[in-house]
Image (spheres, rainbow, N blue to C red):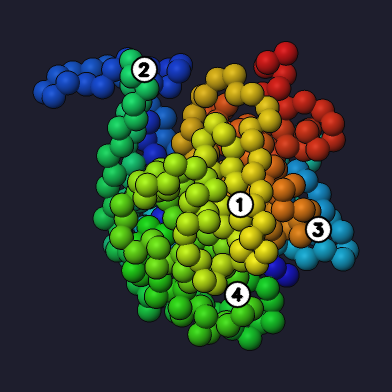
């Protein structure tokens, strides 16, 4: 069995809207009243979002880690995240949001292929409220204003060491993906992994937040690095290739970066082979860009872990197509169905909308 362990924060997003297009007419002035006609609550967070998309890919694209072939290794996903106490309603809701459900008529979810293991999550005693995010989208300007609240104690390097040691001696492949929220702690965690599991553990990290100290040092310890366009531009890069070739990744075998409407690029560090894939299917309407990067990460992890026979360009193109489909819908529902339809030569829901 293969194991994918994702380490990062889990949020509950509250979005104030006036129904479609899921925005309030304008950002409210200070000390003023503005009516929102509806309120949407959904689970968020980079790693949980990536898990949700991966669950769909594992269910809808047989032969990619779902155990449908006798010779195939099942991919077991784990979430390592601080959560409210185990018996709280908030934690129950979060776990339910990542419980497999069938999205296709006649298809039953396979518990072995897409269920998430929460055994290594950190349940904080005495805490009932999850990390929360309040989002106001302005229809007038397109701006998105976010207010965060997180009273949960962050994961410590010592707590993570216990998680890493739980995988020692199993003789199974492990892939560890880190959000990179707190680079100093994450760096300690990665180094603990190297000491405990050695070369048997593959490490990928996200270098996303502009101006966050310690991300370069974190990237230097990873095997696979995901950069964001906003981080690259903050560092003075004007193109995806300039960033990938300009950054130093002494351990990494692969570095990649998303570049908005232009698609994404990756650099194989072993042979310096540069690959780029544009957005091939035109976007008619951007409905919800929140989580597009998490969706791209899901697509790449799926290709790298479950589709080892694919060429690098094929994996990158798959992830770009997946993220392109995501921005044309609210949330992540139906992504697996649409990718399955495209794989079988059909058209996705987004494709049909353009016809």
The residue that disc 4 covers is 201
The residue that disc 2 covers is 139
- Identified at 78% across, 66% down, the residue is 73
* Mark-to-mark CA distance, 4 and 2: 45 Å
Q: Residue furthest left?
A: 31
Q: Is residue 99 left or right of residue 206?
A: right
Q: Position of residue 200 (x, y in %)?
A: 64, 78
* Mark-to-mark CA distance, 4 and 1: 21 Å
Q: Indicate which label's residue lies in the foreground, 3 or 2.
A: 3
Mark 3: secondary structure: loop
* Mark-to-mark CA distance, 3 and 2: 44 Å
Which of the two residues, 277 or 342, is positioned nearer the viewer here?
277
Which circle's residue, 3 or 1, is located before the other in the chain?
A: 1
The answer to whether the residue labelled 3 contacts the one labelled 1, judged by CB atoms less than 8 Å apart, is: no
Which of the two residues, 87 or 308, is positioned nearer the viewer here?
308
Q: Position of residue 333 (x, y in %)?
A: 61, 35
Which circle's residue, 1 or 2, is located before the other in the chain?
A: 2
**In which quarter of the view is residue 346 placed?**
top right
The residue that disc 3 covers is 309
Q: Position of residue 48 (x, y in %)?
A: 51, 51
């Amino acid at each position: 069995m293969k194991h994918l362990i994702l380490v990062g924060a889990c949020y509950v997003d509250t979005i104030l809207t006036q129904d479609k297009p899921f925005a309030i007419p304008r950002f409210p002035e200070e000390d003023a009243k503005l009516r929102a006609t509806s309120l949407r609550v959904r689970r968020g967070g980079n790693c949980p979002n990536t898990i949700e998309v991966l669950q769909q890919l594992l269910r809808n694209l047989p032969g990619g880690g779902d155990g449908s072939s006798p010779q195939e290794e099942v991919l077991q996903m784990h979430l390592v995240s601080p959560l409210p106490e185990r018996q709280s309603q908030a934690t129950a809701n979060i776990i339910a949001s990542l419980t497999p459900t069938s999205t296709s008529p006649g298809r039953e979810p396979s518990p072995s292929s897409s269920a998430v293991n929460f055994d290594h999550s950190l349940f904080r005693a005495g805490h009932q409220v999850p990390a929360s995010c309040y989002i106001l989208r302005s229809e007038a300007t397109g701006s998105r204003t976010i207010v965060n609240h997180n009273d949960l104690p962050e994961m410590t390097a010592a707590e993570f060491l216990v998680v890493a040691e739980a995988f020692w001696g199993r003789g199974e492949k492990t892939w560890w993906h880190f959000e990179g929220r707190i680079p100093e702690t994450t760096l300690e965690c990665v180094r603990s992994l190297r000491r405990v599991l050695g070369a048997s553990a593959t490490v990928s990290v996200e270098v996303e937040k502009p101006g966050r100290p310690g991300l370069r040092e974190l990237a230097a310890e990873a095997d696979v690095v995901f950069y964001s366009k906003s981080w690259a531009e903050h560092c003075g890069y004007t193109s995806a290739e300039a960033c990938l070739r300009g950054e130093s990744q002494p351990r990494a075998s692969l570095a990649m970066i998303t570049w908005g409407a232009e698609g994404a690029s990756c650099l194989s560090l072993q042979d310096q082979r540069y690959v780029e894939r544009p957005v091939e299917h035109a976007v008619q309407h951007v409905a919800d860009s929140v989580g597009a990067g998490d969706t791209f990460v899901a697509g790449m992890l799926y290709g790298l872990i479950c589709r080892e026979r694919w060429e690098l360009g094929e994996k990158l193109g798959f992830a770009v197509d997946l993220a392109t489909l995501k921005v044309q819908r609210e949330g992540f529902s139906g992504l697996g169905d649409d990718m399955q339809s495209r794989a079988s030569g059909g058209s996705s829901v987004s494709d049909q909308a353009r016809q």
